[in-house]
Image (cartoon, rainbow, N blue to C red):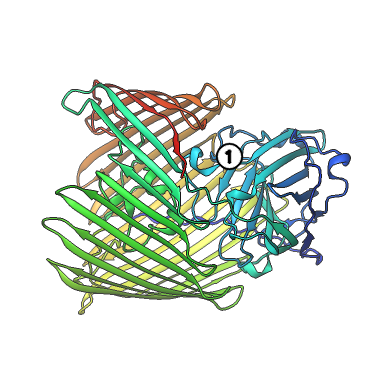
Amino acid sequence: MRFLVSTTVLLAHCIAPAQSNHLKGYPMSTPPKIDGVIEDSEWGQVPYKEGFTEANTNKAESHRTRFWLGYDNRFVYIAGRLEASEPSKIVATETHTNGDMGGDDYFEVQIDPSGTLTEFSSFRINPLGTTRTQLAGGRAVKREWAGEIEAKSRITAMGWEFEARIPWQLMRLGTNKAKRGLRLNAVRHVPADNLTYNWRFVANDSTNYGYWDSVETPAAEVDRSIQLLPYVFGGYDPGHQPLDAGLDMRSRLNANLTAVASINPDFRNVENAILSLDFSRFARIAAETRPFMLEGGQYLGGSAILQTQKIPDFDIGTKVYGRLSDKISTGVLNTTEFGNFSDTAAQFDVSWNQARTSRFSVVNKTSPDVKNTAVLANYGYTISPTWYSFTRFVGTDDNARGQGHELLTNINYGNAEWQGSAEYIERSPQLFPALGYLPNIDIRGYDGGLVYQKNFEKGNLSRFVATAAGDEFHHYHGGMYQRDWVATLALTTSKQVQTTYNYAYARFDGVDDTTHEIKVLFPANNARTNASVDYVTGTANNDPYRSLSLAAHAYLKRKLQLTTTYQKIHLLGENSDQFIVSGNYDLDESRSIAGRVVKTGPDTNAYLSYRKAGNKGAEYYLILGNPNAQRTRGSILIKFVTPLTIKR
């Protein structure tokens, strides 16, 4: 059994002086030129803020960060000047809109258009001017539907600076023009320091966010046009349908609700996530990658009773998501394969106030053999900035298994150094959410854990993390079921060499498992270029168990991303291995060549693709092979997508 603990909390020793958390709203009569050069003639009268602090300790930053914020009736304008003691160490790699900037320097502004602290839209910019938009209510995957911000950045002798404009209409605005106070925060990430800074220190308490005062927001422009993305798919694919067509649709129902639909979707150009080889007594589930399921995903899915990965491909799917009020958001989903199944889900999230939240959801699966309904209700309460409690009830009714339930309640504590939790769980033997994910049932018992972490500014050690966790569960009606103990120690040096040791003991239905794991990662602060080795030895199911994993990532000249992973395990007297090589070469912002080779045991699958996508116009894909087949298929497929709009 393997156990992974990931932590990102930072520690320091001194507290920053108090500063005003209000920024005056400033209407700009003349919009600035978005060229990445901050001119006094454009920004000299615009209010600004500086004095950032470390995200979890409130220690004053060592590099000055200043940002300006203004607006007019169409756009929010933002500029930032971010100093760096060593500009040569600024990291800027991501060139794709909405790509992964986790390893880059970046600046992010977070705006709550309703001022209720219930949803934020965030806009991130890196030193190349690349942007990532996450909208309140879930980021639309398709750029044709999401819209985007315009930004320009440049690296200077003092650090880097940027200018950007954000369309008001990307945010969830009211239907009327209004002067209001918006809640606001800004974030700066500095990978050279492995630190993140906030304008407003929040300490796990969103009420500490800043205020953007007296901002006259425009009325939401509700464009009820129907946006269409029809596709045609054809080519040569022996034994499979060589010609296909389908349609994606999207329309705004009102200022806060969006409807999407997909008719006969084809996901053959969507690369599935792959689970690593591993010993597990329970089912595992890979990440969702299908665009229709990701659209508006903040409002639906990822719960104990709904994992959209368990919904198979379908003939027609519909979804409505958004806000019913400042306090209530919703998502409703249906997918149908004619004559085979119909899956339906509805979810309602309620923010009673800034400390109390609830979720109510129901999921139904119907097929010739299965009639399954699951319901969920939970309640979360922020007791204080360091204490949080959570309670969840799940009930299911299945035509074969009958009625079952889960009751879960926990309490959590967290500050800059310590995090801890304690939890009680009971799940009856009949519990079965057909479209959800609960790794084990027929249990009753407790689990808990404790984490201690500390960062060091000087010396050879940069970070220290120690964790301990355990659980003890009996069968629902008595008898020992499972007992686990896990301890982890992770050290990161100032040279960004991270070494992790993990010890795990498990007793499961009278069978003992014991494993020792050691992992080395370098460099720990670069997500795009690194290498790691992970070795596990011990026993699993009373049998010798060994696992060796090697991984390497390389990002070359801001064009080519290569990833290689290899894993070999020995379990139950047998050896298994998996080898994956994937690559992506960017010809420009909208055109790329990608491929992947996956070898699992005796089976090998390879594919190569050329795509033109994400440029808000016609898209097309040329695919040699199938990204998700078990073995390489001699197929050549072409997919063409073009956006259309029906005004209404």
Secondary element at tag 1:
loop
Q: Nearer the viewer, residue 120 or 157?
A: 120
Q: Nearer the viewer, residue 354 or 6?
A: 354
The 10 Å Cα crowd at callout 1, few under 14, some 14 to 19, many 20 or more, is some
| Residue at screen point 52% across, 42% down | 521
Decide if residue 400 is on the left or right side of residue 126.
left
Query: In which quadrant will I find the N terminus?
Result: bottom left
Decide if residue 443 is on the left or right side of residue 252.
left
Residue pointed to by mark 1: 526
Q: Position of residue 611 (x, y in %)?
A: 43, 25
Instruction: Examine the rendering and report whether any part of residue 282 can be seen.
Output: no
| Residue at screen point 36% across, 59% down | 332
Displayed quadrant of residue 432: bottom left
| Residue at screen point 60% across, 77% down | 384
Q: Position of residue 580 (x, y in %)?
A: 36, 32
Q: Position of residue 37 (x, y in %)?
A: 80, 35
Name the residue furthest front.
648
Instruction: Examine the rendering and report whether any part of residue 86 can be seen.
Output: yes
Residue 69 drawn above or below residue 36: below
Decide if residue 248 is on the left or right side of residue 169.
left
Type of amino acid under label 1: Asn
